[in-house]
Amino acid sequence: MAPSLSPGPAALRRAPQLLLLLLAAECALAALLPAREATQFLRPRQRRAFQVFEEAKQGHLERECVEELCSREEAREVFENDPETDYFYPRYLDCINKYGSPYTKNSGFATCVQNLPDQCTPNPCDRKGTQACQDLMGNFFCLCKAGWGGRLCDKDVNECSQENGGCLQICHNKPGSFHCSCHSGFELSSDGRTCQDIDECADSEACGEARCKNLPGSYSCLCDEGFAYSSQEKACRDVDECLQGRCEQVCVNSPGSYTCHCDGRGGLKLSQDMDTCELEAGWPLPRHRRDSGPAARPGRGAQGSRSEGHIPDRRGPRPWQDILPCVPFSVAKSVKSLYLGRMFSGTPVIRLRFKRLQPTRLVAEFDFRTFDPEGILLFAGGHQDSTWIVLALRAGRLELQLRYNGVGRVTSSGPVINHGMWQTISVEELARNLVIKVNRDAVMKIAVAGDLFQPERGLYHLNLTVGGIPFHEKDLVQPINPRLDGCMRSWNWLNGEDTTIQETVKVNTRMQCFSVTERGSFYPGSGFAFYSLDYNVPVTSAPVTAFYRGCMTLEVNRRLLDLDEAAYKHSDITAHSCPPVEPAAA
């Protein structure tokens, strides 16, 4: 072997000793650190020391084992440790077997030998979880990405196991990472960790006709007392308290309430609890009560309407009787008419929903007849807080209420039309105008800033209701009593595109109007109407209760009572229309 001017093995041994001495002096001046921080502090310094050594080692390896053929002992002098020597020398022999000895000058042999000391070739670390592989003396170090651990960076770190990953509600671990989510009714905040409540009531359709109350993570649909919410219909439905057996004798259910009645002819009156009956002073005790003893009281029988004509108690005869009709009435009805006063609650008698691919304008025309001075004819538009119009009657004249872009208006014009004669009314939506006509004469022309058909999910929608509105009357621009005892015929909605109303009316006589009517209120001999009034009669007094069939008007303290303002009215009682008396037979 030719003499070499490069430093010998002894000089190379002194180099790391000097380096280690310098490192020791530097560490002596450092403050004591926790083990984990100390490891992170020393590792880059160790790598820099190894880098100096590796550069010297690579030069020595080049001379001893690439340019010349080296033995195991000579390789040991290069690495100066057994682990690296044991790793290197068998693979060195494999390079010779594959590419020939160093003297063949095969470039593949030099590359093969030079790569052998690199413990990261091939990379032993997991590719998915490793950021980098660092070559050490006879060893290697895998620097892991966030979310991975283990010697080879092949173990997922479950971030959710420590303080729920910093998530406020739900933490989902996944390989190398995690994410936060929220329970139903909450949504993830912009920080990706905390949750905020979703206000379901921001959707005007969440509860339909009921009131919506937002709750943490949920919401509740509320109804007035005496009503219960129907989630299927998204509406408040009356609770029939009479089915709960609250009254001792006769129970009459009404929207949101009920009343109890006793046999006035039999000498009974309501007790102070307004549910049970007691004997009027001076009346003899009925026989069935005498036989039952002083502690007995009538049971609560089946509840029903007053049209039954008797008290539902089977333990004794009842003197309850109808008042016999004196004259017959002409109660024939027209199958081509629609009675608007059927729903005393003020809810619509007809609901229609139109959907169009293109923007469309409202066109509606119908014949109308009424003696009623106030009530709602129709509603057209979207939901309560969007764009809509309401055509109503107030003091016998047409009134139009509008809400466009959150701004409400009320206008009224035209002749008095509650004279009981048929007239033709039309509503037409033009470009930025609404025109209302009576008998083809325009009585109102109002400038508007929008369209009634509103875009929603790629279509244009319009809700149209007849005889009521789809929300409470207090939410109108100007409140009005929605109940209207009126009659409609020859209707035409959007140029006759809907024909279902006529078919429905034909099979339901209660939706039909009397063919001929006069002023007055008609009591068909069934059902109740009652008022909440202040007058000087004891609350537990019970006049004779009997059914009346015919027309009549009521006054209290010289004030004419309007059945539309009653606390409750049976739907068969008409408030402002009465059929005429049939002519006497010849």
Image (spheres, helix red, strand yellow):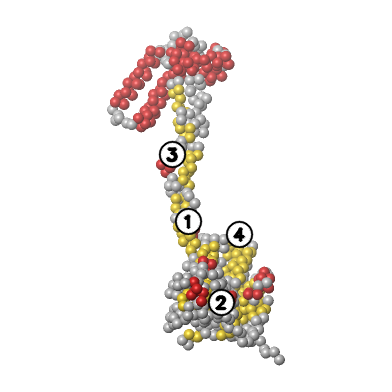
Q: CA distance from mark 4 to mark 2?
A: 67 Å
**Label 1 sits on residue:** 218
Question: Which mark is first along the chain, 2 or 4?
Answer: 2
In terms of secondary structure, where does tag 4 sit? loop
- Going by the picture, which residue comes out furthest to the bottom? 586
176 up-or-down from 298: above or below:
above
Q: Which mark is residue 317?
A: 2
Q: Nearer the viewer, mark 4 or mark 2?
A: 2
In terms of secondary structure, where does tag 2 sit? loop
**Label 4 sits on residue:** 458
- Discs 4, 2 touching: Cβ within 8 Å: no
In terms of secondary structure, where does tag 3 sit? helix
Question: Which mark is first along the chain, 3 or 4?
Answer: 3
The residue closer to the viewer here, 446 or 3, is 446
Residue 523 position by quadrant: bottom right
The three-letter code of the residue at mark 4 reads: Gly
Residue 53 appears anywhere in the view: yes
The three-letter code of the residue at mark 3 reads: Ser
Residue 318 position by quadrant: bottom right
Q: Residues within 10 Å of mark 4 (few under 14, many from 20)?
A: few
484 up-or-down from 581: above or below:
above
At which x and y percent is residue 274?
46, 73
At which x and y percent is residue 345?
54, 72
Q: CA distance from mark 4 to mark 3?
A: 46 Å
The three-letter code of the residue at mark 1 reads: Ser
Numbered marks: total: 4
